[in-house]
Image (cartoon, coloured by chain):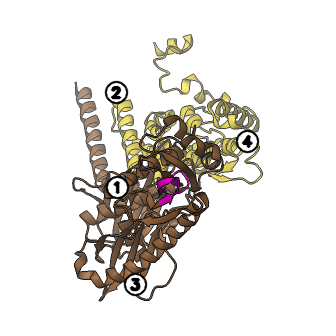
Amino acid sequence: MKDSLKSIVVLTVICLVVSAVLAGINQVTAPIIAENQSSKANESLYAVLPDAENFEELALPEGSPETVTGVYRDTAGSGYAITLETSSQYSSSNMLITMGVGADGKIVNIALTNYAESKDFGTETYPQTYIGADSALSGIDTVAGVTYSSAAFKNAVADGFTALMSVADIAAGEKTEDQIVSEIGTKLFPYACNNAGVCQISATGETYSDIKNLYAAENKTGYIAAAEFGEETIYIAFDAFGTVISTYNSEEEEADASSYSAEIEKASAEVAALVSEKNDKTVTRLEKMFEGAEITPITLNVQSSVSSAHTVITPDGNYVAVTAAPYGYGGPVEILFVLTEQGDIVRFKVVSQKETEYFGEAVAESGYASKQEGTSVNAADEEAVTIAGCTFTTNAVKAAYADAAEALEAYNLFE
Amino acid sequence: MNKLSIMLKGLIKENPVFVLVLGTCPTLAVTDSVSRALGMGLSAAAVLICSNIVISALRNIIPDKVRIPSYIVVIAGFVTVIQMLLHAYLPSLYEALGTYLALIVVNCIILGRAEMFASKHNVVDSALDGLGMGLGFTLALFMMGTVREVFGAGSFFGYEIPGLSHYTVSILTQAPGGFMVFGILIAVVNKITKGKALKKKEFGCAGCPSYAVCGKKTETEKEADR
């Protein structure tokens, strides 16, 4: 009995002492272990914001961009880390991006942790071009030939800034004139944007004495003039025919055109010169097709891929010539339709295209054109229009049909 | 037995792995890389030294009936301490050793030394025995880890060995390779000690903590017990 009691007491005391020792050591190590674990979870965040001490996740408001999976704030105030997930829909898995933004609103570092797109946009080099950029992302382009993936990347970063600015006190970066023009262009001229949704509008490269700069869409379906108005720069948008569509102030807000009438007048004159230069080329082309015809440019109230319209008066009959240039796979597919007033296609000519070799040849060859001639622009012959295996080019031709038909309707109404 | 020889015997003559063939499970499991092997060896050595000291100090207090549970509690306590310290200060080693770290509790070297040595000798001798056995275990693991990592993975401590990394015997990093290396090293140690070490009675059945109950006693021993 005495032995048993001794055994119980000794074993209990040993257990108690060991427990006490473990409790003491746990007091010391537990916080260190917890810290290690949290820093491990945030390892990718530290990679993009190396000066950070500890991260806390910020709650995103409803309606934040879906690409943003998390916004984290460094508790020491060195900046923010944002995790993003996006895709160009041409990949087996989503791109995963982590970006670090300093307290000054500039990108400190950016890491691409998963990339499964079919084409490499330079996974090592391209993200590096974003370092130092602010929310305006000025001077950052998409990668030629890998437009879809690089545009998706760029849009994700822009979304990251949008989400960050909604939860943190980060000043918006100042946008360059080119960026503002591109944004206005994307809004106003969706038909001047390529399939990746990037508006193809660029400065003409000329210098103007009375306006600051003039931008033309690649497919000549719209123009934007930048003009000085006192201290600020205003933007005046024109359609393909040189008619003013809207006016924007330097904050990219739509403004009342009447307050800028002098600037609009000057810009209109410059745009008119570009429009007439464009029309002259078409007139020359039509003169070759219809010898001795009387060709007059006309202005239509349409905003589409139609870049110009002319009346063609010949002894045999009167026609309307419409040029439409919707985007195919590689760039605008510029098609000249010569139509009767009823919409019958008299001539169909692919004036220019930037499609890949095989499809480019297929759409530009005379056989393809002759299949279209004789059909009606109002009802595209599915069989004649379709180029097998070439969805983008086919869709471009279909869009050209629809836009030409709309232009003809506008002409007939006007008449 | 002088103090030095108590310590030194664990290294080769009574090496726990190659001569006593104890602790085979962790020996085979963690020796695919030198750093894991070394981490495991030193962790076990630390537990062995501490538990030997405590068990030796308490040898006259702990009643015979509860000695095994008492040893286990002490050993488990030290293993948990090591676990917590590694988790806090060497998290990468903690993760590399994984569950084998906790399994030091049931490592028969530690319980074996507690039963065979610490419970019968004074604190200083027990500490030296723990040190010697711990270093012997570490040395054995280090040797096995070196052979397996250098020839199996073409690297040492994770650093690639130029020229060797293209000519690796990858089976060495797997379990069968572990057994082969283990067997070969036992043979080498046996050769060096000329087989003397294995003949000691202490290492036979009589040295086993469960000897009294396992039914392997010879008739004369049973007679003597009666």
Amino acid type for the residue under numbered disc 1: Ala
Residue B53 on the magenta segment? no
Do pointers 3 and 1 mark residues of a single chain? yes
* Number of residues whose C-alpha sits closer than 10 Å to that of mark 1, classed few (under 14), some (14–19) or many (20 or more): some
Residue A323 inside the magenta-drawn segment: yes
Q: CA distance from mark 4 to mark 1?
A: 78 Å
Local SS, label 3: loop
The residue singled out by tag 2 in the image is B65
Disc ID at residue B168: 4
Label tally: 4
- Residue at horizontal 47 percent and vertical 16 percent from the top: B225
Chain that is yellow in the image? B
Question: Are dots 4 and 1 on a single chain?
Answer: no
Q: What shade does chain A have?
A: brown
Residue for badge 3: A211
- Residues marked 3 and 4 touching at CB (< 8 Å): no
Circles 2 and 1 in contact, beta carbons < 8 Å: no
Is residue A271 among the parts visible in the rendering?
Answer: yes
Point out the frontmost of discs 4 and 1: 1
**For residue B196, above or below residue A158:** above
| Chain ID, mark 3 | A
Label 3 to label 4, Cα distance in Å? 73 Å
